[in-house]
Amino acid sequence: MSHSAGHAIPDPQSRAVATAPSMARVLLLSTALVVLYVGVGAWGFVFTPDALGIPLVWPATGVGLVFVFLYGYRLLPAVAVGAGLIAILFTGDMAPPLERVVSVAATVAATALGAGLLRRWRFDPRLAHLRDLGVFLVAGGGVSSGLNAVVGAYGIAAGSEQAAFATTWWVCWAADLMGLALIAPLLFALMGGRFLLPPGHDYRVGGTLIIGIIATSVVVYLVPLSLAVALPLSYLAFPLIMFAALQCPVQITTGLIGLSGALALTATGLGYGPFAALGLEHSLLALNAQLGLLVITGLSLTAIRSEREAAESRARDHLESLARAGRINLMGQLSATLAHELNQPLCALTTYAQAGRRLLQRGEPEAAADALERLEDNARRASETVRQIRTFASREAPDRQSCSPAEWVRNAEALMRRELGQRGVALQVNVAPELPPVAVAPIQVEQVLVNLLRNAGEVLAGRPDARIRLSVYRRRQELVLQVSDNGPGIPPEHLSRLFEPFTSFKRGGMGIGLALCRSIVESHGGAFTARNGNAGGAEFRFTLPLEASHGHAQTDRSSGG
């Protein structure tokens, strides 16, 4: 009885497939193939309880399939040599010489056909996907093993009047398929460029599982137990294989599957264990069914785990790409924000520096000292703005202090009153009396107010009777700050995207200010809204939470909101 193998093209997605070997390597690989082919074939023939000489298991098919798949069709002659030696050494006079030659030729053809199918279907020998497991079972177990079983059954049926072809083919195919399933995955794992076990694993777990498989096999097959006890105990191999498939490298999982199958088949072939007591036909059916389920379970879980890890790796790569894009975007936003926020204090620095120089030239040192003091304040404000933006961008908690709302408003008004006056815009400020202090990063809140006042001033520039109203009042446990104007209002189509970064309906706008304002307010635990007023114009309102110690005072408003 002889059997098959296959070969795959080097696939960029399958690094386990080797490149075409040199002639010296071909000779070395051919020798290894023949030795291993004959060795496992001899092992199969040792356990031949059937009078017709049908082995209980036939792993030679898997050996040929793996070698030819990994190293090419140039190893097909070695398959023919191995199959010929098996025919000469073990089949004896069971079949005429011509039939043995035909059997060897058919074995080589089945090997080539199986290899061609695996190649055409782009089989990955790492068995890292459920699809590859299905391809392996169809091309290897179905086509190659099926054709080899036809050859073997035909030879046996032709040489014996007692052997029916259909029954003999089924027995041959079951033995061939089981040998393929037990040995081929292990050889793929070891010979597919991965003789060395991958680093980062605790191989004590693998050693413990090997000991567990051996101990289980000894108890089931060598300890004298009743059939009712031994048969259920034989399934103890399943949780061990399943654990290995989920926790260990594929070399260990396939090795445990091969070891478990070899021990079970050897013991059964020697007449030990619960399956041997059932007789050949029933033992083949029961044992091969159990081992088949064991192989499918172990390899399926291995493939599922590999797919899951690959998906997690792709997700990590995607998140890293998003993180890089986010950092690049943040750098762009930070640069734009710095340019946006530093424009006003830097302009003020220039103005006060020029004023101070003129005052000194005119001999007015006291007035120059006042200009220099204002220059120093704006320089400190620019520095604080940079520090606050860096803190905000790095997601660090800003330094907060308990401040009076009137102080923020006064600072923002002082910064913007001159600019608004130049644009012909009147600024009306209404601050409710006796407002409690609020714990905030004051420079950030001032930044929000300045942004809102500047935006309103730019929209109102050149309009008759242009005015802005800034109102600050308390509403229950919130402080409300509202900036409204009598301009054209916000275009309705822009309301839903008003706070998106880099989205602006203002000519020359960068779309940074409002997005930053809302982020600042939300980082303080408040809320930021925008709408068009009932009497026209735009209305921007944000809230800041008051401390619980301030109680629940009634709503206090100095101006409508």
Image (cartoon, helix red, strand yellow):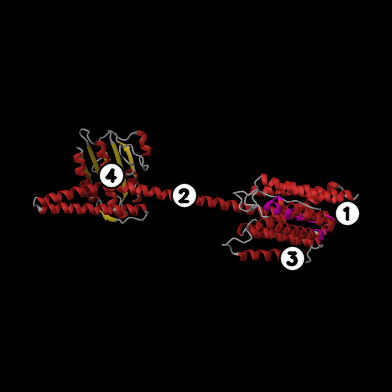
Q: Residue at x 10, y 54 (%)?
A: 365
Which disc, if any, is residue 219? 3
At label 3, the amino acid type is: Val
On the image, the x and y values in percent for residue 278 come to 82, 57
Q: Nearer the viewer, residue 484 or 118?
A: 118
Of marks 3 and 4, the one in the foreground = 4
The quadrant in which the C terminus is found is: top left
Q: Give the range drawn in magenta.
A: 44-73
Mark 1 crowdedness (10 Å alpha carbons): few <14, some 14-19, many ≥20: some
In the image: residue 256, left or right of residue 268:
left
- Closest to the camera, between mark 2 and mark 3, is 2
- In the image, 16: left or right of 354? right
Q: Mark 2 points at which residue?
A: 321
CA separation, marks 2 and 1? 67 Å
Q: How far is disc 3 from disc 4 in space, using C-alphas?
A: 81 Å
The 10 Å Cα crowd at callout 4, few under 14, some 14 to 19, many 20 or more, is: many
The structure residue drawn at horizontal position 61% and vertical position 64%, both measured from the top left corner, is: 203
Question: SS class of the residue under badge 1?
Answer: loop
Read off the residue under disc 1. 94
Amino acid carrying label 1: it is Met
Mark 2 or 1, nearer chain start: 1
Residue, far left: 363
User: 369 or 391: nearer the eye?
Assistant: 369
Label 2: which secondary element = helix
Q: How far apart are marks 1 and 4 (CA)?
A: 99 Å
Q: Earlier in the sequence, mark 3 or mark 1?
A: 1
User: Residue 507 magenta-drawn?
Assistant: no
Q: Residue 140 carries which label?
A: none
Residue named by callout 4: 451
Can residue 379 be seen at all in this image of the molecule?
Answer: yes
Q: Decide: few, some or many residues near mark 2? Use Cα within 10 Å; few <14, some 14-19, many ≥20.
A: few
Q: Work out whether mark 1 precedes mark 4 in sequence or the reverse, and give the earlier one.
A: 1
